[in-house]
Amino acid sequence: MKALFIGGTGTISSAITRQLLEQGCELYLLNRGNRNGALPAGVKIIQADINDEARVAELVDQHQFDVVADFIAFEPAQLERDYRLFNGRTKQFIFISSASAYQTPLSDYRITEGTPLSNPYWEYSRNKIACEDYLIKQYRENGFPITIVRPSHTYDERSVPLGVHGRKGSWQVVKRMLENKPVIIHGDGTSLWTMTHNSDFAKGFIGLMGNIHAIGESVHITSDETVTWNQIYESIAGALGVPLQAVHVSSEFLAGCSKEDYRGGLLGDKANSVVFDNSKLKRLVPEFVATTRLDQGIKQTIQHILAHPELQREDEEFDIWCDKVIGALNVALATVNE
């Protein structure tokens, strides 16, 4: 198989890249070359900015691909560019959308690919929906061979998966745990969530590549494991060997007192209970099974981050904000109980 990934070094795509090369795929990555240092041997680089359409057109002019996948498209204009570049040049075009595009709030917590797409809380999700609409139109009217993939919360060894964190990632929450400080969990921590290790996601994604039954289809790829946010944070604390000091804060309050996009990331996503039905994926890829249990995956991630100081990006602004939020709650409790 000859494949081209636009991107190829992110959380999701890096695991797919590794597994494809192990399977002998002829894999090209089209990117600017900023994060290619850790790529495994065998990958072929087409170094360019995908937004430089004329240059990219020159570089791919002599290529025909079995699969082209865009991991970094977020707006319809970017898919219009991809269509111009790759229509007639690939047997399958895979767009990485998002499970956050599904109906929010849900009318049924069990999500299938037939669940309506609607998210009034998050522009990111609405843009992904618009991207899907554009591609479906090209498939229906022009025969463009699309497959739409919807990941949910996918993680790797470089960052601990969380509900509430700052601009610089998850390390500051880990640091607070190590320092025996309280950490914020949105809501009461009992809503249901699904996290998927990127190595498991890759197995499902690769099974869709070159799959004639996936053309024209939309498919989400997630683990079948469902956990609460309390369990997620307990797993992190357990991997660190420290007790969890949790402070539960309503998602609406967090969205109202932060400059972070918690309206989108929480109210439009993580504050809602979700359980994914992966029956469609398993029909298309019968061998798919997610094998990395959440507590095991988090333990691996914690070990990796603790061994790599460059991943420990401190976020003083977020740390101060956490203390302010927790302090405000304590003041409110004291006032009510006077």
Image (spheres, grey):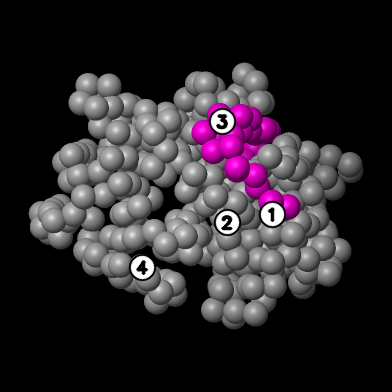
Apparent side of residue 175 relative to residue 129 in the rendered image (left or right): right
Q: Three-letter amino acid code at disc 4?
A: Val
Number of the front mark, 1 or 3: 3
First-in-chain label (2 vs 3) = 2
Q: Which residues are magenta?
A: 266-293
- The residue positioned 59% from the left and 80% from the top of the image is 309
First-in-chain label (1 vs 4) = 4
Kindly indicate whether the residue at mark 3 contacts the one at mark 1 (C-beta within 8 angstroms): no
Frontmost residue, 264 versus 216: 216
Label placed on residue 292 = 1
Residue designated by label 4:
43
* Disc 3 from disc 4: Cα separation: 30 Å
Disc 4, SS: loop
Crowding around mark 3 (Cα neighbors within 10 Å: few <14, some 14 to 19, many 20+) is few
* Disc 2 from disc 3: Cα separation: 20 Å
Number of the front mark, 4 or 2: 4
Q: Is residue 270 magenta?
A: yes
Kindly indicate whether the residue at mark 1 contacts the one at mark 2 (C-beta within 8 angstroms): yes
- The residue positioned 41% from the left and 44% from the top of the image is 209
Q: Three-letter amino acid code at disc 2?
A: Ser
Apparent side of residue 45 relative to residue 176 in the rendered image (left or right): left
- The residue positioned 54% from the left and 79% from the top of the image is 310
Residue designated by label 2:
199
Q: Three-letter amino acid code at disc 1?
A: Thr
First-in-chain label (1 vs 3) = 3
Frontmost residue, 319 versus 75: 75
Residue 70 higher or lower than 142, as above or below: below
Number of the front mark, 2 or 3: 3
* Disc 2 from disc 1: Cα separation: 8 Å
